[in-house]
Amino acid sequence: MDFYEPRRGLMITSINSVFAREVYDEFYFAGEMHDFWEMVYCRSGSCFVSEDGRVYEISNGQAVFHKPMEFHRLWARRGETAQLIIISFSCAESRFIDVLGNGVFSLDTVLCHELCEVFEQLCSTFDCSVYPVGKADSSAAAEMSVLLRTELIFLAIVTEINPGHTQLRSIGAQNYKRILNVMKTRIDENLSVEEIAEQCFLSTSNLKKTFRRYAGCGVKEHYNKLRMIRAAELLKRGMRVSDVSGKMNFSSSNYFSGSFKREFGVSPAQYVAKSVWNRDK
């Protein structure tokens, strides 16, 4: 007899960090990217968040989810304070989880209450004082219970709420989006800061000022990071170091290898070997 096997639309495989944060009075978080998901929920007040080229303002009862390898940061307006809950997690790929990266979600009172309760339960179940989250004295049943409860809340957000694409439309936010688009579409070309500015129809000084405001780092610094991530993807696909170096317009394989090691802490060959080992485990 063939039994119907329903698919799990969303399955969390690990909780990576859980913490609360208060941001206020022009606080700036420099920004980061990582290979797992992150939820930023605003319990009260308001703040700004950016992810890739999109810039949002979130206020109490709203949440935004950052996708894996999506550069994101947050900051507060002068005189404003925001109480935030931040949970990062890894999960299996699915059409449900992809929806979470589509904008700002406004939670109703019930979901807000549920989410705050789950936050407290996560903090009491795991050791959230360390990164990544560690094991506490809780039983396996308690760990599974809070994971399932977290999944249910995320599924409720996906199925019950239509995300709002309330991006900021200021000139600065639009210029920032344009800058990132140039970086991504011309990632193989090793553009200079001046060339990026020219492609964006901005002066070099305006480019630098705009990018640091929304990204919290330098133009070349972020462009080089994106290029290294792209190079790592090509290496994982089996491309040789010399071919990656040529495709990415580095002056030599040695220069590429040195840049790669400064970014990832290992040589391209070590990175490939580690990737193969992890894949075959």
Image (spheres, helix red, strand yellow):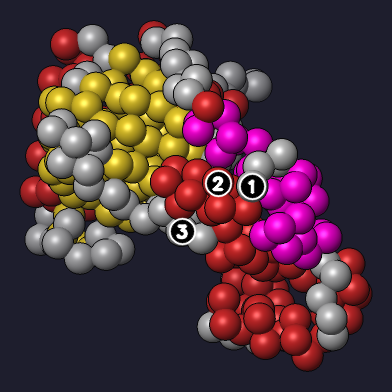
Of tags 1 and 3, the one toward the viewer is: 1
- Binning the other alpha carbons within 10 Å of mark 3 as few (below 14), some (14 to 19) or many (20 upward) gives some
Earlier sequence position, callout 1 versus callout 3: 1
- Binning the other alpha carbons within 10 Å of mark 1 as few (below 14), some (14 to 19) or many (20 upward) gives few
Residue 188: x and y in percent read 81, 59
Q: Are marks 1 and 2 in contact (CB under 8 Å)?
A: yes
Q: Quadrant of the C terminus?
A: bottom right
> Going 27% across and 64% down the picture, which residue do you hit?
131
Q: Secondary structure at mark 1?
A: loop
> Going 37% across and 55% down the picture, which residue do you hit?
30
Residue at numbered disc 3 = 217
Q: Is residue 15 above or below residue 84?
A: below
Q: Nearer the viewer, residue 206 or 235?
A: 206
Identify the mark at residue 203; answer none if there is no mark. 1
Q: Is residue 192 above or below residue 125?
A: below
Q: Nearer the viewer, residue 48 or 134?
A: 48
Q: Is residue 180 magenta?
A: yes
Viewed as shown, does residue 194 lie left or right of 85? right
Q: Which residues are magenta?
A: 172-199
